[in-house]
Image (tube, rainbow, N blue to C red):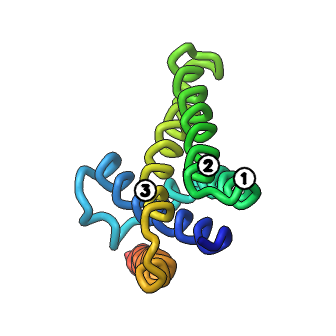
Amino acid sequence: MNAAQTTWIAAGCSLLGMAFITSLAIDKSFAKLIVSDDSYIASFAATVPVTAFVAMGVATGWWFQSTRISWIATFLPLLCFSALLWIADLAHDFGEGDQLVGYLGIGTLLGGVCGSLAFTVQNPYSRLLIAIVPHVVFVAGYLTALNAMSHS
């Protein structure tokens, strides 16, 4: 399993998954995905830490030559980071009304769940497909939303 490809796949799956999840959370439907960029912007914020944790995890897995260690080294720190942000927000450690930290924690956890597809698919042709399709769909949707917003 290629470490760079796994990180790329996790980033794409996280971006696309978070765009759909955020659209449901913010707009209560998928219809706004083609007319508003809100879901796409929010998915960027959660995908950055997910990609960093996946890169760290696959590097650790490469060092030990183990896919299981790679998966554990990715998702254990990701879960701890997400829980820390969410609990800190619940305890109001970041100030009153600042719920962005909690949303980032929840988004990072959900993005990590979406990105976990990169660790489960082993077939080379399937890996190639999921390395390309999520990124293309995300960019096409984002460009469509930007185009719709520029004409309104």
Residue 34 occupies quadrant:
bottom left
Work out which residue is located at the far front of the displayed protein and give it. Answer: 65
Q: Callout 1: 10 Å neighbours few (<14), some, many (20+)?
A: many
Task: Report the front residue among 98 and 9.
Answer: 9
What amino acid does circle 1 point to?
Thr
Residue at 52% over, 27% down: 86
Between the C-alphas of marks 1 and 3, the distance is: 20 Å
x and y percentages locating residue 130 in the rendered image: 44, 77
Please say if 1 is above or below 72: below
Q: Nearer the viewer, mark 1 or mark 3?
A: 1
Task: Report the front residue among 13 and 149.
Answer: 13
Of callouts 2 and 3, the N-terminal one:
2
Label 1 close to label 3 by CB (< 8 Å)? no
Mark 3, residue position: 114
Label 2 close to label 3 by CB (< 8 Å)? no
Task: Report the front residue among 152 and 129.
Answer: 129
Mark 1, residue position: 60
Of callouts 2 and 1, the N-terminal one:
1
Quadrant location, the C terminus: bottom left
Mark 2, residue position: 69
